[in-house]
């Protein structure tokens, strides 16, 4: 990117001065204040020139000047203060280091620290940083008094401060400057923090900078070990979070610390500030500010996370892969991240991808861009494409020894293998991901890997292993105070018990998960909890209760705009109405579910809904429509290799084909039946009708009786009068009695 003027970096000393009480005097006696200002200017301007300095700018009663020689800056300040009197009370602060010179102005951390030293100086004193004193080649004639380590506003580290000692100056004593240590969490407390998306103070179109850097900062801090960080999703679910008081934010997010900041892009310069507020101490415990050129954009996040984690006594994360990338590539990545996570349509997803491809063209080693690109494909079920990109990211991350990138890539590959039914492969990659997280000390990552590992074992029907992994994940989440992780693990443990037909146990865990989500105000978690409780009641035969919970779920998901969840809810409601024999409402809800599946590009869900519609037409004896929908479902399921669901569809299709006189492969059908574990009472009844085999009728009947045995007395009569159970019972009595 071209610049409007020359930018130069060089070593210099910076001196700030201002008049004590000038603002107050101006409000009382403006004329006297202006005379005092002229008196100061008449003194200091010639002195700056005499000591080979340069007056950069005047800011009201303040002056900012720079010096190539450190001693010249100190001697200028000394001479100036020696010439002041009781009328003209002035403070001075000096710091040195690498300074950015641009447009006849100066920027950088050095400038900020010099300004803050001046602000804490006593009248007629000169404060100097230890770094400046250490850099002095000639200290002859100079004497300094140590004032200890000081926490300066807007500076992310403690500064060792000294006062220039002279009979002509006021020399403060050390006890006048109370050592201000950063007070953080106790040794036995897991620090908890909410990092609020930075406020964009620049142009509206630059909002992606603030959003993207904040999102990355949350991710980095989450992976820093024993620390709990509120998710970006949980923050964004708070209505008008940017208008809430800090204490209210902390309360709603259930954290102790709140980090807030602003980002302002001015031409080719960035100004970024951040404050860490401790609600327990009711004060800001750390703050920092940077002024950086656009070329240094990739370093900003690293500076932020390092400073923030140090303030919380937590080990910083390595950012080498990001810090070495080009600013153009990183900017495209930030734009893409903002576009994708704020997406409303598929066009937004495509735009995000285009931006990510541009980022990767500029810097093919930007791992975070590749893993985000893979995620955009994984989320819509394009697993082969996602796998290809994750694999490339993994290879590059390994070559760069980017452990964070390795862990993310391994986890992404594991999830794809899981979604494709390759459970053993999924476990292999999850174990590798967990080991990386252990090396990093990332307990969040370990907990996540264990949670996903438990889900895989659940799907493999290896229930003991599933429960062992999930309970360990739960322990870590509780240790971290990570209630989001706690809710997730509780929910998944409930799923394992549900799959084992331990409905009462499952209900307990689902209810506990729901309670935690309600405590958090996490509507996504609340919706999932209500939905799963609805499933339990459906399995118990209490369709009215199931309908109630599914309806509550639907309302929550409508509120938060959870399209994937809405697809599930309409499908679940459709199944209840189907079981009740209310076929028109069942079809209405299935069609709404299908619309959402198509809208988000969820091929797997689309295949399932098409099957449900096909089976609904089947029970109504509309065989042609049944065939049409089942064939569409089968086509999709073959495309995405959903073997189990494909099996169900083919069986029902064959039953249809026989009824309408189409050809079918009887041997293939029997093979499919042999390979299936439990087809359910309705399926077995249809097989009985199709194959004219009484064994299937017996299976169907015993399944109905098992359901009845698990029900409360009040439900039994209601259940056996639903269309399918009633049909099975009546046919069984007709055949066997």
Image (tube, grey):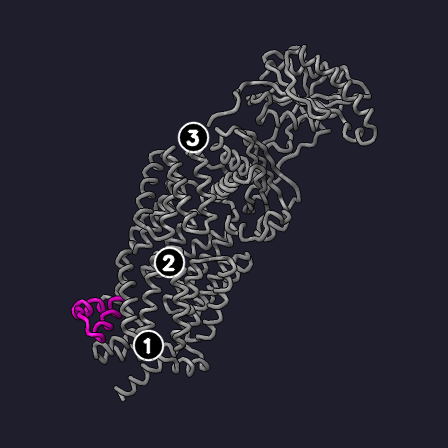
- Could you say which quadrant of the image residue 629 lies in? bottom left
Residue 598 is marked as 2
Looking at the rendered structure, the secondary structure element under dot 1 is loop
Q: Nearer the viewer, mark 2 or mark 3?
A: 2
Q: Position of residue 725 (x, y in %)?
A: 35, 80
Query: Does 575 sit above or below residue 701?
Result: above
- CA gap between label 2 and label 3 equals 41 Å
Instruction: Pick whichever, 514 or 693, lies toward us.
Output: 693
Q: Is residue 686 shown to the viewer in this render?
A: yes
Say which residue label 3 marks: 324
Q: State which tag comes first along the sequence, 3 or 1.
A: 3
CB atoms at circles 2 and 3 under 8 Å apart? Answer: no
Q: Magenta segment: does it hold 231?
A: no
Q: Position of residue 519 (x, y in %)?
A: 56, 58
Q: Is residue 29 left or right of residue 177?
A: right
Quadrant position of the C terminus in the picture = bottom left
- CA gap between label 3 and label 1 equals 64 Å
Q: Which residues are magenta?
A: 649-674
Q: Magenta segment: does it hold 667?
A: yes
Q: Residue at x 37, y 66 (%)?
A: 499
Q: Is residue 657 left or right of residue 159?
A: left
Residue 620 is marked as 1
Query: Does 557 sit above or below residue 504?
Result: above
């Amino acid at each position: 990117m071209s610049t409007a003027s020359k930018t130069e970096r060089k070593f210099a000393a910076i001196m700030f001065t201002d008049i004590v009480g000038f603002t107050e005097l101006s409000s009382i006696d403006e004329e006297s204040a202006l005379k005092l200002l002229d008196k100061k200017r008449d003194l200091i301007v010639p002195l700056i020139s005499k000591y080979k300095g340069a007056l950069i700018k005047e800011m009201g009663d303040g002056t900012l000047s720079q010096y190539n020689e450190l001693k010249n800056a100190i001697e200028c300040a000394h001479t100036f203060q020696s010439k002041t009197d009781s009328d003209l009370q002035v403070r001075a602060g000096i710091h040195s280091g690498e300074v950015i010179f641009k447009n006849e102005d100066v920027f950088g951390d050095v400038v900020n620290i010099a300004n803050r030293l001046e602000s804490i100086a006593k009248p007629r004193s000169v404060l100097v940083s230890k770094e400046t004193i250490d850099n002095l080649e000639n200290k002859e004639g100079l004497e300094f008094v140590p004032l200890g380590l000081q926490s300066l506003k807007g500076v992310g580290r403690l500064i060792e401060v000294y006062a220039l000692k002279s009979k002509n100056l006021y020399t403060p004593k050390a006890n006048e400057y109370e050592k201000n240590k950063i007070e953080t969490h106790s040794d036995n407390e897991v620090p908890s923090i909410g990092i609020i998306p930075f406020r964009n103070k620049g142009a509206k179109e630059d909002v992606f900078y603030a959003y993207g850097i904040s999102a990355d900062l949350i991710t980095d801090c989450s992976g820093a070990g024993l620390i709990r960080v509120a998710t970006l999703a949980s923050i964004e679910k708070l209505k008008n979070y940017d208008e809430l008081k800090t204490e209210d934010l902390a309360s709603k997010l259930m954290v102790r610390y709140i980090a807030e900041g602003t980002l302002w892009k001015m031409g080719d310069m960035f100004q970024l500030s951040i404050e860490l507020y401790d609600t327990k101490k009711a004060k800001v415990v750390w703050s920092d500010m940077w002024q950086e050129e656009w070329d240094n954009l990739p370093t900003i996040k690293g500076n932020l996370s390092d400073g923030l984690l140090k303030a919380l006594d937590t080990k910083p994360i390595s950012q080498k892969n990001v810090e070495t990338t080009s600013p153009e590539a990183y900017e495209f990545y930030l734009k893409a991240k903002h576009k994708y996570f704020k997406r409303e349509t598929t066009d937004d997803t495509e735009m995000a991808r285009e931006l990510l491809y541009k980022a990767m063209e500029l810097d093919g080693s930007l791992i975070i861009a590749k893993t985000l690109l893979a995620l955009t494909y994984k989320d819509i079920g394009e697993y082969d494409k996602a796998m290809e990109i994750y694999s490339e990211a993994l290879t590059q991350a390994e070559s760069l020894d980017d452990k964070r990138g390795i862990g993310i890539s391994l986890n992404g590959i594991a999830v794809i293998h899981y979604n494709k039914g390759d459970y053993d492969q999924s476990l292999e990659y999850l174990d590798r991901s967990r080991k990386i997280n252990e090396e990093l000390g990332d307990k969040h990552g370990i907990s996540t890997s264990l949670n996903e590992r438990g889900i895989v074992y659940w799907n493999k029907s290896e229930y003991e292993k599933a429960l062992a992994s999930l309970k360990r994940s739960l322990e870590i989440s509780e240790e971290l105070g990570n209630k989001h992780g706690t809710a997730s693990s509780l929910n998944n443990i409930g799923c394992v018990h549900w799959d084992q037909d331990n409905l009462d146990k499952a209900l307990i865990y689902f209810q506990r998960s729901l309670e935690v989500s309600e405590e958090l105000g996490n509507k996504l978690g609340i919706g999932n909890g209500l939905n799963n409780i609805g499933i339990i009641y459906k399995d118990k035969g209490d369709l009215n209760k199931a309908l109630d919970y599914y309806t509550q779920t639907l309302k929550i998901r409508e509120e938060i705009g959870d399209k994937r969840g809405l697809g599930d809810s309409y499908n679940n409601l459709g199944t209840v109405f189907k079981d009740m024999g209310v076929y028109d409402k069942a079809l209405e809800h299935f069609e709404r579910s299908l619309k959402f599946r198509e809208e988000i590009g969820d091929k797997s869900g689309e295949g399932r809904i098409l099957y449900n519609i096909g089976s609904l037409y089947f029970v109504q004896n509309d065989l042609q429509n049944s065939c049409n929908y089942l064939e569409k479902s089968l086509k999709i399921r073959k495309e995405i290799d959903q073997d189990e669901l494909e099996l169900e569809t083919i069986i029902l299709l064959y039953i249809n084909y026989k009824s309408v006189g189409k050809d079918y492969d009887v041997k293939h059908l029997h093979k499919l039946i042999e390979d299936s574990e439990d087809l359910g009472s309705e399926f077995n009844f249809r097989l009985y009708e199709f194959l004219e085999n009484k064994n299937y009728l017996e299976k169907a009947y015993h399944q109905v009786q098992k359901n009845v045995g698990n029900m409360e007395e009040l439900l039994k009569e209601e259940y056996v009068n639903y269309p399918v159970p009633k049909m099975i019972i009546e046919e069984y009595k007709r055949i066997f009695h």
